[in-house]
Image (spheres, rainbow, N blue to C red):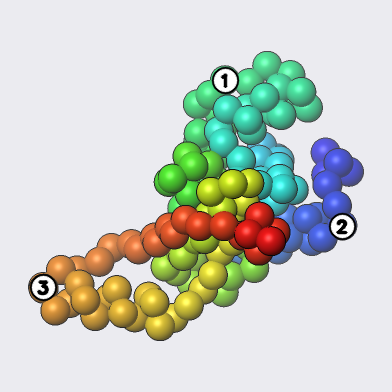
Amino acid sequence: MDDRFSTATKALLDSAALRCAKRGAKLTELRRHVLGLILESPSPAGAYELLDKLRDDRGPSAPPTVYRALEFLTEHGFIHRVERLSAFVGCIEADPHDHGHAAQFLICQNCKKVAEIDDHDIAHAVQEAASRIGFTLARTTIEAEGLCAACAG
């Protein structure tokens, strides 16, 4: 099943499987396949796009199948949902102990590519601003739109 993925993606999938095992979870073949598709996608992948690719590779698949896999992968910190695009991006290389880190995305308005940044100063500033008004954050995702270097040039 993994032969359709690059060597780099296979290594990330193996890393994800090990991290799951350490947590007492399982990266099933389906979850692994969905994660591989997201990691190989040149831009954020939507649920129905993933469903179409799964159908091409595995035959009939129902939407709940993909949504359950996406929920698992999000919960374990292997992907992020980019709300503005209703799509998902991979995040395996983050600190394996920090699967709830604050996500910060730069979204190109032209080509729709997404860059994730991990700026602790931004996360800290949001946390401090919330604390000043007595708000307790459960999760933080920041999405900023503009033009990527390629589209701006």
Q: Are marks 3 and 1 in contact (CB under 8 Å)?
A: no
Quadrant of residue 21 in the image?
Answer: bottom right
Q: Judge whether 31 appears above or below 144 on screen.
A: above
In the picture, the quarter occupied by the C terminus is: bottom right
Q: Nearer the viewer, residue 107 or 69?
A: 107
Label 1: which residue?
62
- Nearest-to-viewer mark from 3 and 1: 3
Say few, some or many: other residues with alpha carbon within 10 Å of mark 1 (under 14 / 14 to 19 / 20 or more): few
Three-letter amino acid code at the position of disc 2: Thr
Residue 41 falls left or right of residue 73: right
- Secondary element at image label 2: helix
Q: Judge whether 71 appears above or below 96 on screen.
A: above
Q: Specify the farthest residue to the front.
A: 153
**Which residue is at 43% across, 58% downward?**
143
Say few, some or many: other residues with alpha carbon within 10 Å of mark 3 (under 14 / 14 to 19 / 20 or more): few
Q: Specify the farthest residue to the left.
A: 134
Label 3: which residue?
134
